[in-house]
């Protein structure tokens, strides 16, 4: 039997709900929109704040060895970076020698990592123990398929796996249990990055296949063809890794980093499976590439929260367009990554670190924004071709704001109290977190001069416009978008802005990362201003209908209020949508069905003592996506 489409199921269930007026619980097995009364995102792994540390790849590629790795680890300690939180020391591609036959035990390249020599065997445990003794943590790298990225992209490079075809199959495919046991139970690694070339780059027609005798892997991912990706299969393979990690590390003290480069619809489900997921292809130390990677994560605020982070790739501070001759750009790159709660993984040979670069990684105020325990990824308060204004609400209710000049010309931006969701009649004081200067207080607005490519980051003190509560868009770290209503994943045009790899060959860098139509704070799912009929909303959540969000209220609030309706951005003007609010699984408010052009409906309901508020929008007809708005949605004390 073909399963019902989600939209049809939604319609049926709306009808069922209308019949039994008190129905609060439909069976979750049959209804994806049924309330669960709990937080259903993955709680595996240990990443309450974005992981910080160092990774070998951007500095060394596969030319990595123990001296280089331990040298950078020692530098993390000696330079005071470890104390700031940079504790993960992560291997990347290039560490392996072979998969021993016939017992399949992975062998380390002991010529490069001498401490791993262990009789007939190899063992990373001594190196990992040394890192632990230094107060650091250790990360390892593998691939979801049978073979690796370097075996496809630089098969003649240094440190390629050796031996027969089977011995060179060092990826985790068909070996998930055994490899994770080796890496986590035996060797005691704390972090794993799982790449994805093995499931896409080993088709018979590729030039590396014959000369290197690799086994063909029937692809489940297709470069540049997101519509063909077998998203469920890709997710299921990553889920296997997650399950093995849980099995071999019941202490839950590990990080699972998914590296499928924004493919496989990972930007939607990453938070259900791992602790971070790449939102795009690799970062290169080029300005346009930095913009591209930043854009791939910057509108995904609602998909990240403590334990689960959007990953626009590792830092390239210190190289190319972000080297010491380009400190403005380097500070911008770092500031943006910090603001959007990206993992902060240094990609530089730290044995050569200089003061100007250290002042960037070591800016404790900027690091503190990234590590703020609320885990609210900065929300885009303003975006144009030239200027982005990003506002991050911190755990103590204060705000950090980054004003970012994307352009190669100086620009004077206007920051308003409204951008900060501050009361415009009360003074606002900014402290610059790069220069440490405190600005004289302003009200309403302030002109801010920016050099080309400059980002200024401030701590902002003022009077919040909702002093007794929070707009949901100020607490994205407490929201899990359990179902965003996207039925057919479409590429997201927001990350379509770069001359790829510095060239203008072909038709351009077409959008390939799906997620378009996903939930957004203070914007519709199609990146327009929130609007229900003639009424616009500066605050709120835009999402498609047939969606469910879980909000961690933690019994801290008294009321939930919102003005809801079909957003003008809807692709479907005939559907009718019902909004339902649940408190710990119990229906506590609902609206009559509303349609396109109808005025907003008001919800105002008691949430005293409620731990999880669930927000459901059900649509009657799924012919085309229905955009809805939870306008001014807020929890108040
Ligand atoms: C890429 C990955 C990089 C690096 C490289 C190693 O797929 O995105 O971060 O790990 O493979 O070959």
Image: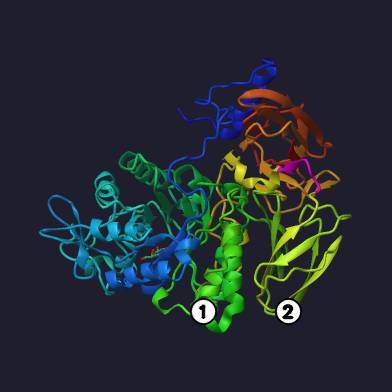
Task: Please name the residue shown 75% across and 41% down the image.
Answer: 469
Task: Please name the residue shown 42% across and 74% down the image.
Answer: 350
Along the line of sight, which residue is nearer the eye, 242 or 591?
Answer: 242
| Pair 1/2: label in front | 1
Q: Magenta segment: does it hold 326?
A: no
Along the line of sight, which residue is nearer the eye, 522 or 372?
Answer: 372
Tell me whether the residue at label 1 lies in contact with that at label 2, contact meaning CB atoms closer than 8 angstroms. Answer: no
Along the line of sight, which residue is nearer the eye, 635 or 267?
Answer: 635
Dot 1 corresponds to which residue?
Answer: 355
Element under disc 1: helix
Instruction: Dividing the image into four quarters, tell me where ligand 1 lies.
Output: bottom left
Element under disc 2: loop
Residue 80 x, y percent position in the rendering? 47, 67
Dot 2 corresponds to which residue?
Answer: 410
Give the extent of the magenta segment: 465-471
Q: How is the image coloured?
A: rainbow
- Residue 109 visible at all: no
Q: Magenta segment: does it hold 468?
A: yes
Residue 166 x, y percent position in the rendering? 18, 57
Task: Please name the residue shown 67% across and 49% down the image.
Answer: 396
Quarter that holds the C terminus: top right
Q: Is residue 447 above or below residue 423?
A: below
Q: Is residue 432 above or below residue 631?
A: below
- Residue 540 visible at all: yes
Residue 232 x, y percent position in the rendering? 43, 43
Q: What distance separates the C-alpha of mark 1 from that of mark 2?
A: 26 Å
| Total numbered circles | 2
Quarter that holds the N terminus: top left
Of labels 1 and 2, earlier in sequence is: 1
Q: Is residue 177 left or right of residue 617?
A: left
């Amino acid at each position: 039997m073909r399963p019902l489409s989600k939209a049809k199921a939604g319609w049926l269930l709306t009808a069922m709900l209308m019949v039994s007026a008190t129905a609060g619980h439909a069976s979750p097995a049959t209804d994806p929109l049924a309330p669960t009364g709990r937080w259903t995102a993955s709680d595996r792994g240990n990443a309450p704040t974005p992981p910080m540390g160092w990774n070998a790849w951007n500095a060394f590629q596969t030319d990595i060895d123990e001296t280089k790795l331990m040298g950078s680890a020692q530098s993390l300690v000696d330079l005071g970076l470890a104390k700031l939180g940079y504790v993960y020391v992560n291997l990347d591609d290039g560490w392996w020698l072979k998969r021993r036959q016939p017992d399949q035990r992975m062998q380390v390249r002991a010529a490069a990592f001498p401490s791993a020599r262990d009789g007939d065997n190899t063992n990373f445990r001594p190196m990992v123990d040394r890192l632990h003794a230094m107060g650091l943590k250790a990360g390892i790298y593998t691939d979801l398929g049978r073979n690796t990225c370097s075996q496809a992209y630089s098969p003649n490079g240094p440190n390629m796996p050796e031996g027969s075809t089977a011995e060179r199959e060092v990826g985790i495919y068909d070996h998930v249990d055994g490899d994770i046991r080796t890496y986590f139970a035996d060797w005691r690694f704390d972090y794993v990055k799982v790449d994805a070339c093995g499931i896409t780059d080993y088709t018979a027609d590729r030039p590396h296949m014959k000369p290197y005798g690799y086994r063909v892997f029937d692809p489940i991912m297709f470069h540049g063809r997101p519509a063909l990706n077998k998203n469920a299969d890709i997710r299921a393979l990553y889920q296997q890794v997650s399950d093995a990690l849980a099995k071999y590390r019941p202490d839950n003290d590990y990080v699972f980093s998914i590296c499928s480069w924004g493919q496989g619809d990972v930007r939607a489900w990453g938070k259900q499976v791992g602790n971070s997921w790449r939102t795009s292809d690799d970062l290169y130390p080029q300005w346009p590439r930095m913009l591209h990677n930043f854009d791939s994560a910057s509108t995904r605020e609602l998909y990240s929260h403590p334990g689960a982070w959007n990953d626009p790739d590792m830092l390239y501070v210190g190289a190319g367009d972000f080297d010491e001759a380009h400190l403005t750009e380097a500070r911008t790159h770092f500031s943006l990554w910090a603001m959007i709660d990206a993992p902060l993984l240094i990609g530089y040979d730290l044995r050569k670190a200089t003061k100007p670069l250290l002042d960037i990684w070591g800016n404790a105020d900027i690091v503190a924004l990234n590590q703020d325990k609320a885990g609210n990824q900065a929300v885009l308060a303003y975006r144009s071709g030239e200027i982005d204004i990003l506002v991050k609400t911190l755990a103590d209710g204060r705000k950090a704001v980054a004003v970012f000049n994307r352009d190669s010309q100086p620009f004077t931006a206007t920051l308003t109290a409204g951008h900060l969701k501050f009361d415009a009649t009360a003074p606002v004081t900014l402290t610059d977190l790069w220069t440490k200067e405190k600005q004289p207080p302003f009200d309403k607005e302030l002109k801010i001069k920016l050099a080309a490519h400059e980002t200024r980051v401030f701590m902002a003190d003022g009077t919040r416009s909702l002093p007794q509560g929070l707009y949901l868009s100020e607490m994205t770290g407490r929201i899990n978008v359990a179902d965003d209503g996207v039925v057919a994943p479409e590429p997201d045009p927001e990350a379509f802005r770069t001359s790829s790899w510095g060239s203008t060959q072909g038709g351009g860098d077409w959008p390939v990362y799906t997620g378009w139509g996903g939930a957004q704070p203070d914007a519709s799912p199609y990146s327009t201003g929130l609007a229900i009929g003639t009424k616009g909303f500066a605050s709120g959540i835009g999402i498609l209908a047939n969606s469910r969000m879980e909000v961690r209220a933690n019994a801290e609030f008294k009321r939930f209020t919102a003005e809801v309706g079909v957003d003008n951005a809807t692709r479907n003007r005939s559907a009718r949508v019902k909004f339902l609010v649940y408190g710990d699984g119990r229906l506590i408010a609902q609206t009559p069905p509303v349609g396109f052009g109808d005025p907003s409906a008001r919800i105002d309901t008691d949430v005293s003592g409620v731990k999880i508020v669930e927000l459901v929008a059900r649509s009657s007809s799924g012919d085309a996506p229905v955009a809805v708005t939870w306008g001014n949605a807020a929890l108040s004390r």
